[in-house]
Image (cartoon, helix red, strand yellow):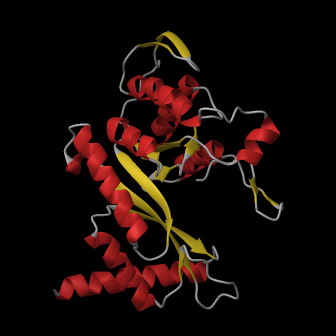
Amino acid sequence: MFDHLFDQTEDGSIKGMHEAWTIVSAVAATTERVEIGTLVLCTSFRNPGLMAKMAATADEVSDGRLILGLGAGWHDPEYDAFGFPTDHRVARFEEALEIIVPLLRGERVTFAGSYHTTHDARLVPSARHRIPILVAGEGPRMVRLAARYADAWNTAWYGATDERLSRQLASLSEALENERRAPGTMTRTVGMVVRDPGADAPVEESEFAGSVEELAHAIDAYARLGIDHLIVLLLPMNESSLDRLRAAIERRAAREAVS
């Protein structure tokens, strides 16, 4: 689920969406197997203690299927419309992580920062499961924070693999080394945009619009780079697009079975 109040395009038009965490809770209550996550929850919109409390509760409802995706936010029009501060977003994000992460790990947190304060805060009841924390970000500071605090990292959006992705992966590897953290302890996720080539719409540079067979090979390319999860945004979002993705996955599985 995306976490935006609205999306304003370059031409000034507005696209709306429902509130992400309410959707998370609804999906958690009505499914049994699928993992549920946010890509990503904006720490600017909610108090970090409340966010940790929400995560522990939704994880309880889902019986341990939550992935808590967190980000610093970026879309100025929604900040301006609803009165959220746009200054020092990454610094605010770092302080939020310093509260959210230990709370979810069962610790009591006393913290006095420039933007957030807690006094012997705790989650009661505490989270019964270890909730994976995913940090999305591409700048050096965001990648460093992912290496320091997160179980998973995300970069988006891409079509086929490219040099930009290779640079991001190298940046993550450097950050993990600087944090003295083993590379295998970080789950790498990538947001991939897959457009149906038969759809009547222009293809953007950050979109993949090849055939089913080409899509299967594109997914192989991500796997070879060490990507653990692809988060696929289908355009258009309909059953036909989903069928194409399923067919590509089945072709990969068939090849692996033969080999």
Most extreme residue toward the top is: 119
Q: Is residue 245 left or right of residue 82?
A: left
In front here: 213 or 244?
213
Q: In which quadrant of the rendered image does the C terminus lie?
A: bottom left
Residue 36, x across and y down, in percent: 48, 51
Identified at 55% across, 14% down, the residue is 117
Q: Is residue 155 left or right of residue 228?
A: right
Identified at 33% across, 36% down, the residue is 148
- Image: 111 above or below 218: above
- Image: 88 above or below 230: above
User: For residue 218, which quarter of the picture?
Assistant: bottom left
Residue 111, x across and y down, in percent: 47, 13
Identified at 40% across, 74% down, the residue is 161
Residue 249, x across and y down, in percent: 38, 79
In front here: 75 or 129?
75
In front here: 204 or 191?
204
Q: Quick check: can you spot residue 66?
A: no
Residue 78, x across and y down, in percent: 75, 45
Q: Is residue 51 left or right of residue 247?
A: right
Q: Quick check: can you spot residue 167?
A: yes
Q: Is residue 66 left or right of residue 202?
A: left
Report the number of discs.
0
